[in-house]
Amino acid sequence: MTVRKQSRILMPSLAGLSLLSILACEADDPKAPAQGTGGQSGDIGVVLDGAGGGPGDRGVVLDGAGGQPVDSGGVLDGAGDQPPPGGADMGPLPDLPVPPMCVAAATDFPSEAWGLCPAQDGTLHAFEPENISTIARIDAWTSIAELLWEAPAAPRPEAFGQARVIYAQMEGLDSRVSRRDDRHLTATVPEGTNCRDAGVPELYPEYCVGPGRILPILTAAFDAGQAGVLPTVNAARIEAALLWFLYVSVYKEAVTCTTTKRDCDSAFAYYTGDGERGAPEGLARSINAASTEGHSRTFDAVLAVHCWRELDAPDVAVDLPRRDLALAQLDVALDFGVSRILTSRVERWAAANGAAKEADWAFLQVLGQGFLRAIALQDADVAIAVAAVLGGDGTGVLAEGLTGPLTQLFPCP
Amino acid sequence: MAYAAGMNVHADEPPEGPAEGPVQHDVAEGPVQHDVAEGPVQHDVADGTIEVVAPRKTLSPEGHATGAITHKDVDRELPRSLPDALQVIPGLWIQQTSHGQASPFIRGVTGQRVLILVDGLRLNHTLFRQGPNQYLFTVDSQSIDRVEVVRGSASTELGADALGGAILIRPRDPKLDPHRDEVIWHPRLRFRHATADQDTGGRVESDLQLNDSTAVLLGVGYREVGLLEASGPVHGDGGREPQSPCFEVDGEVRCVGVEGQAPPDLGPRRLQHGTGFDELTADLRAVHRLDADTRLTAAAYVYREFDAPRTDLCPPPEAPSEECFTYTEQFRTQAYAKLEAGPKLAALNRLQLAAGYQRFHDRYSLDRPRSSVRLGGRDDVDMWEASLFALSSRHTMGPLALEVRYGASLTYEAVSSAAWTQFTSNDSLFFGSRGIYVDGSSSKHGGVFVAPTLDLGRDLTLRTGTRLHHARADSPAETESGTTAVHQSFTSLVGNAGLEWRFVSPLAASVNVEQGFRPPNLDDLTSRQATGRGYQLENPDLRAETALTIEAGLHLRTRRTTAAIWAYQMRLTDTMERARADCPTSDFECRANRAPLQLVNLDGVSTIEGVDAEVMVKLPYDLTVRAFLSRTVGEGQNPVEGPGEAKRVPLSRIPPLNGHLDLGFEHAESGVYAGARYAYADEQARLSPSDRTDVRIPFGGTPGYHQVKLRAGLRIPADFALGLVMENVFDSSYRVHGSGVNGSARGLMLNMEVMR
């Protein structure tokens, strides 16, 4: 035995093991981007493309009109620019009264026709009060609002970054946006269509409204905001996209409450968080700001859904006529509420100028897009006309051209 | 096949003839395991080469129910992992949350309640989660010589966490012949393939004796494992399917919804999405023999697992099918030195002293491509540990004989943790204020034990022992997340007593009473994480949980037959169990989860009771029959209070009635072997409240199953080996209760080796 012979065998082995250890090193943690920008987004603009925009395109998509880019300039790099006024400086939204001829239908909740249910006392009696995770998502919405569209000044890129982190949290808003479907359109897709499945949102973007329509708007707006591009405009887009999400979510949860009772709790929470009638959150806050009566009626409508399930106790609902009554009331109230949000925003847009005007128009484009289905249900021709208007940059548009149809088609909650 | 039945194994007692003196059961046909030097012994190593090393005696506590596998079993059964290899041990139940993870249940408990030791050093670390974890998977099955499983509490001799039992891993040694002062090289090349998951890989090994006192074993392995094919989904009540796993059909991911209804017109679903991984292993073990009684061992083990999805979160329930939670890196690195000596002093006849370093590294990522979001994180724990196991000489006084085992252990662990959110659409990155754990947390624990064994004549043995253990956990406050500081100490004093009565040859009976304990670790005290059942929030006020196990066994041992039956009851006090939590206002993730949870100490006593029965009979014509049956029932206080809620409910993930029947043939001269194993598990419908919401458990419970596995091969020492296994012969769909993946479809496994 010689040392040389030992070494001939041993040394390559040890060298091999050492090499292996080096190759199998732990990866480094990702490196944080430079302070202030939150990323290297470059020139990410949000583009309206009514002509050629496919479902997979990033950016806001409006069908039916030849959209034009509406953003120009306005890049904040987070260093020295003086930001334009934020949402809080854009002026209050007008509270639009309900016309006096509006009278609740005899079948509307609350009424004696509904019988005795806990919701008759005008408050939520949750089926699983400890288990309403939606409330946290509405709280997240509130936090995002404070960072972006309710901020005292135009949000800086860091604020967009912070807001996006809140938005993207596990089980947070993004987790639901990315799979949300519009239960109004169930009949338009093949049975068993599941928006979870890859490729399905691209096939059915209207039904898979979350991933198909809302998510691209949010992604593009967050990207742009983080890059310092048109902060108020992109904050407004995010606000409108999230309201759109809440609008479809209230109805979706009300429908799926047929088989999962706790979804009625979620329907309520998607409307107003854990808020009482007098302390609305989320969508309710926005509707209330535009129409207190509209909020009150929508609050009644989500309670109607709850009352139906309180009376229809089996795990899977059997009293479908009562359900449909509740859903119809909810539909009317929600549509009225969202129409009032749009109407009041149109009026503010008409009175605004500069960045605030651009932001309001961006808001209208996004939420208006989400409301086209409801408009089309009332009058398809009006929907096409509204889409055409919203597809433009607002130049030459008269406020009455938008508020008129909205008031006409959605007169009462 | 060589799993040991009955009680713990002794090196110095061949498995022949009726028991004389203390019962020393061993039906193992592989190399006998022993860890404390006791004088030269010769025995066969796995490939048949004669190995002469300083022998060691088992460090497992005596008088307990044990079982074991050896490297030889691994060579014949071709398991996918070390936990997979342990399935043949009575009383052991292997749950798999994912294809690349597996967690052993002993007597109905797992995770933090099962202690794993590698060469006497703890594998358990302070980040072991409540419930199943993946860490046993990080021990390469090709690097082990023997794994012994102690069933029942063994905290007195082995330390904290051994509530349900312990797994004692003995790595392979290099071959060392002290009579040959020359260089002897035994290279080995191994190739492996399995059809069910396209598992393809191999190992290169160099077993090098440098001289008559030093030898080095070096091995490097690599494999790539693809999607695991199952025979189809399993079905719960009403034909509904569990949400985990999703299947790939024509390249597309298809999942069932919350209602458990499969999408229509899908056709056959066999490929399980969220499975597959890559694995790199390396090990180096050098042994230096100082004299006949003393030897030094230096060893290093490197385990690297890449891109192992967590099946039940790939995608998370109800999430888009493109989403997937993946452990991109799951690493273990261990290095230690060990001294085994036999001073032959009155108070110190033999000893094993080990000291080492171990690092666990997890890097994970939840990819949400639809949203351009990637939620990532990293958790590391660095462990420095030392342990001493010692044995006195045997002192006799007339019919009495006294032997004392004693030892000490000390561990320090430091934790590093981070979490971040990445947006892939613009490459932006945001770090969270804390990870799953609080960066800079640490844990220290140690203890001493003494365990005398007194033989009262030929027929009676009395065993007893006591351990004093102290643990401390420190974690800084983290204000942004509202995390409070933790500075907790836990001191435990436990003991045991056991009596063994060899009342009539070849029968013996045993009764043991053992206290076990588990102080809360940093995972319990500080973690915030999404689990399979909800979002777990820390609880800095937890107390240690303790167990009192009473067991009775009856053993039979003849030249051809070994049998044992054990009945046991474990009473857990201050049981740590997940209960509904109130989330801090600042923790959106907690509040957004439908099931915010927190570990709490349950009031009252939780009980786990059961019976394990096993038998091995050597038949003519080199045939051997082995069988076991295991039954466990557990219940505890319902952590959910309220009207309509039962006061006591089944404990979580208790395995169903299960058993194996194995018929083996092995022809020593030719090296030919063959066998068939039938595995049975009953339906498990006794579910805890959290089991009912676990997407890994089918609606109403996990259906029972019957499985048959065939094996055959040829092994010619110092030449070559060829092994074949056919798994799931009848291609039936099944799932091990609590698992997130279904068992593999019918498939072949091939193992080829050339060696010198």
Image: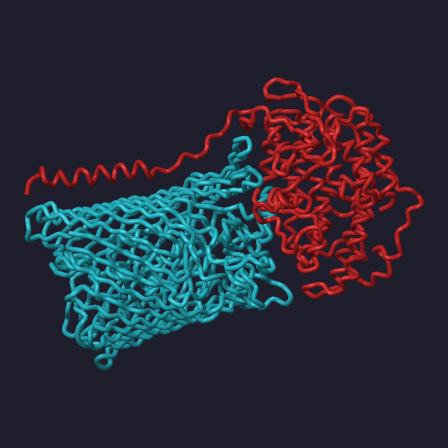
Chain colours: A red, B cyan
Q: Give x and y (percent) for residue B24.
A: 22, 70
- Farthest bottom residue in view: B504
The image quadrant of residue A115 is: bottom right
Viewer-side residue, A396 vs B60: A396
Q: Position of residue B81 (x, y in %)?
A: 34, 55
Horizontal side, residue A90 vs residue B696: left or right: right
Whether residue B459 is visible, yes or no, is no
Image location (x, y in percent) of residue B373:
55, 38
B188, B625: nearer the viewer: B188
| B439 left or right, relative to A208 | left
Q: Is residue A110 above or below residue A79?
A: below
Q: Above or below — where is B485 with respect to B753?
A: above
> Looking at the rendering, in which quadrant would you find the N terminus of chain B?
bottom left
Query: From the viewer's perspective, is residue A166 above or below residue A298?
Result: above
Residue at the spot x=46%, y=46% of the render?
A: B326
Horizontal side of residue B211 vs B713, given as left or right = left
Residue B261 visible in the picture: yes
For image coordinates 73% across by 56% down, the residue present is A125
Q: Residue at x 67, y 31 (%)?
A: A148
Task: Count the marks.
Answer: 0
Question: In the image, what residue occupies the spot 66% across and 40% down?
Answer: A213
Query: Residue A309 at what x, y percent from top left?
Result: 74, 60
Answer with left or right where residue B164 lies relative to residue B321.
Answer: left
